[in-house]
Amino acid sequence: MTSDVQVQTQHSPANIMAGESKKLYAEDDISKLAVLKSTDSIPRKYLMCVAAASVAEATTYPLDLTKTRLQLQGEIASGGANLQYRGMFKTTLGIISEEGFFSLWRGILPALYRHAIYTGFRMSAYEEIRNSLSKTDSQGHQTGFPLWKKVVAGMLAGGIGQFMASPTDLIKTQIQMEGKRRLMGKKPRVTGMSDAVRKILRQSGIPGLWRGCWPNVQRAALVNLGDLSTYDSVKRLILDNTRLKDNSTTHCLSSGCAGLVGAVMGTPADVIKARMMNQPTDGNGRGTLYRNSFDCLRQTVQGEGFLAVYKGFLPCWLRMAPWSLTFWLSYEQIRRSFGAKAW
């Protein structure tokens, strides 16, 4: 009798519905995990990162052009010792009045190509390294990925990514200075991105595309030391030690700290990189002003003082802070929209 009751109970409509419901929930969880796994694939994360970087670059690019112009003013080796510094705002207004408003976006195309290579690689590589090395404890806190590992991972990801993207930075820097060269009565050096590539290849071959790459790689490694590791660490500290959630407020605070540290660490190498890439070349494609990045650093400090390596710091920081803010907010929102987990 008891067994009959148990059989009837097991096969009752309520139990059948409960079993079906659990099955549906299990299937739903499996499908959600499958979607999350496909959304979190490396190619998809790479594309989401490139999209966010493009938004940030297009928004803040005028500050990058202003920064480059300031870094190259008063360059002793090029005979510009007597140039009058105009500062960030006067330089920006001067570009608009002398060259036109849209000249503030001169060189934007190679800049976007650069981020498609550089930012896409550094973000994907850093995240994969972090995910493979870190663990989560019982309270949901991330462990196994201390600050020194974040610093090493950030510098490696940034340095390798920038080495791959260095030709686009060389072309961008040369295009950014064309308006100024023409105003000074100099003959145009390049007319556009494709023309710049042809002339560099004709003068010095494929290796010429990587002229000035080492200070560029050094800058990228230092910037990523400040950007990726700082953002990651500050965000984790906020989430673990405050009541703030993983939202826009946390992203703003983390990206603000990341931009400041990145600018402090990266500006000296950025100045050297800009001067190495902008210097004229001889018939063999070799620079005529500096033998290498250390020679450029020596001449800059001896001729203009130590603070010369921080020329353009204000627009560099003012660009890096909103760039970092725009990028991280866009990136986190894009990931959320596509169903990927937070960075």
Image: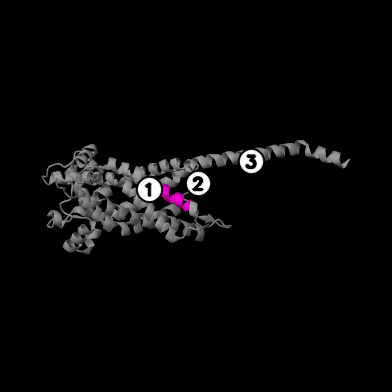
Label 3: which secondary element: helix
Label 1: which secondary element: helix
Q: Of tags 1 and 3, which is closer to the observer? A: 3
Is disc 2 surrounded by few (<14), some (14 to 19) or many (20+) residues within 10 Å?
A: few
Question: In the depicted view, which residue is nearer to us: 281 or 172?
Answer: 281
The residue segment tinted magenta is 120-131
Looking at the rendered structure, the kind of residue marked 2 is Lys
Residue drawn at (20%, 49%) of the image? 278
Q: Is residue 135 left or right of residue 24?
A: left
Q: Which residue corresponds to mark 3?
A: 26
Residue drawn at (28%, 42%) of the image? 110
Distance from Cα at disc 1 to Cα at disc 2: 19 Å
Looking at the rendered structure, the kind of residue marked 1 is Thr
Judge whether 211 appears above or below 25 on screen: below
Most common SS among magenta residues: helix
Label 2: which secondary element: loop
